């Protein structure tokens, strides 16, 4: 029923686009489409309209519209208006003119190797991200995702930064996490990453974190500074240990079938502008993160800096996550290609 409902929602939006007579939505077909047609992409995400990513997606849409003289239109939908992530991705796979902001953990359900991007101490900087985009190894994973599963990676230049352990306890080494229940996302790579570094992973919706911390159903979470502050979790969790165990990279994807229906020049513009908007907002988020950190300290949050944390011990512990999921070879190959 969920899938039927989500499909009806998308069909309703598409019908609206046809009804106004100003857009011709094109899906399917082969590369080298008609440059006189208007191609519309409905791009969704689960974040709010106030999130920095919304700003980036709108900027991307405007740049693409301008460079294609209005022949490629990106309509951005915040707050999961297009439906649940699972349903939207399935519709993309069937060729619907839809895009989505996701992460490699989700994409790893299709091409297992891609999940390493969300693993412990894999990519660790913007420079790593930029270099990874050029690697034949990574491009091969993306090609497999498109050819076998119908999902085209437009960009993974959207970086939210380092995830840290946030609790009411100072954490300096993996053994400090023993017995602690730490909230994380439900995908296997997230769960195993938290387990590997010493804690017990707990999957909870974001809306439940505050009350769970307040009632001590969880001992903390792992997250980036901005999300922690925006949710006012500093009221119940007052210690941030800068473990930097995951460098959070997000992916913009769309239907490979729809993407292949575009003229080649439009395909290039779509990708180029997605990267440009992504790197710009990633730089901005990094600056905001530093400002947020200072504000949190002023509010009484205690920061255990990376220099006081045994990162080598955390890296050694984190490696177990890759072993459990059977992606150690993929991780090692990626790090070797990155020169790390």
Image (cartoon, grey):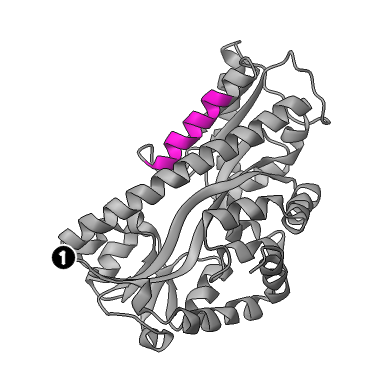
Q: Residue at x 73, y 37 (%)?
A: 95
Quarter residue 294 falls in: bottom left
Q: Residue at x 59, y 61 (%)?
A: 105
Q: Position of residue 82 (x, y in %)?
A: 52, 38
> In the image, is residue 102 above or below residue 51?
below
Quarter residue 48 falls in: top left
Question: What residue is shown with label 1?
Answer: 300
The answer to whether residue 281 shows anywhere in this view is: yes
Nearer to the camera, 148 or 57: 57
Q: Is residue 122 left or right of residue 152?
A: left
> In the image, is residue 275 above or below residue 127?
above
> In the image, is residue 322 above or below residue 63?
below
The answer to whether residue 8 shows anywhere in this view is: no
Q: Position of residue 29 (x, y in %)?
A: 82, 30
Over which residues does the magenta segment extend? 51-63
Check the picture and name the quadrant holding the C terminus: bottom right
Q: Is residue 262 left or right of residue 84?
A: right
């Amino acid at each position: 029923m969920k899938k039927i409902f989500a499909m009806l929602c998308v069909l309703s939006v598409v019908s609206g686009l046809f009804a106004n007579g100003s857009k011709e939505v094109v899906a399917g077909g082969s590369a080298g489409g008609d440059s006189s047609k208007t191609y519309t992409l409905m791009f969704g995400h689960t974040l709010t309209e106030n999130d920095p990513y919304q700003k980036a997606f709108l900027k991307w849409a405007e740049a693409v519209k301008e460079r294609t003289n209005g022949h490629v239109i990106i309509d951005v939908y915040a707050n999961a208006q297009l439906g649940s992530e699972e349903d939207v991705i399935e519709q993309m796979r069937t060729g619907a003119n839809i895009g989505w902001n996701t992460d490699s953990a989700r994409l790893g359900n299709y091409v297992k190797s891609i999940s390493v991007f969300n693993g412990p101490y894999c990519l660790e900087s913007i420079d790593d991200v930029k270099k990874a985009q050029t690697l034949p190894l990574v491009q091969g994973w993306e090609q497999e995702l498109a050819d076998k599963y119908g999902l085209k990676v437009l960009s993974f230049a959207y970086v939210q930064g380092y995830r840290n352990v946030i609790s009411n306890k100072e954490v300096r080494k993996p053994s400090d996490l023993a017995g602690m229940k730490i909230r994380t996302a439900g995908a296997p790579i997230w769960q195993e990453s938290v387990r590997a570094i010493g804690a017990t992973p707990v999957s909870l919706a974001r809306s439940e974190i505050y009350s769970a911390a307040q009632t001590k159903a969880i001992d903390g979470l792992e997250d980036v500074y901005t999300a922690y502050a925006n949710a006012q979790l500093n009221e119940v969790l007052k210690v941030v240990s800068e473990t930097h165990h995951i460098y959070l990279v997000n992916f913009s994807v769309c239907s490979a079938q729809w993407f292949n229906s575009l003229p080649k020049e439009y395909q290039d513009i779509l990708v180029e502008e997605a990267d440009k908007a992504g790197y710009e907002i990633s730089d901005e988020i990094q600056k905001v993160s530093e400002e947020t950190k200072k504000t949190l300290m002023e509010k009484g949050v205690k920061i255990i800096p990376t220099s006081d944390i045994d990162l080598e011990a955390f890296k050694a512990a984190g490696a177990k996550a890759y072993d459990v999921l059977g992606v150690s070879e993929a991780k090692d190959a990626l790090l070797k290609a990155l020169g790390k």
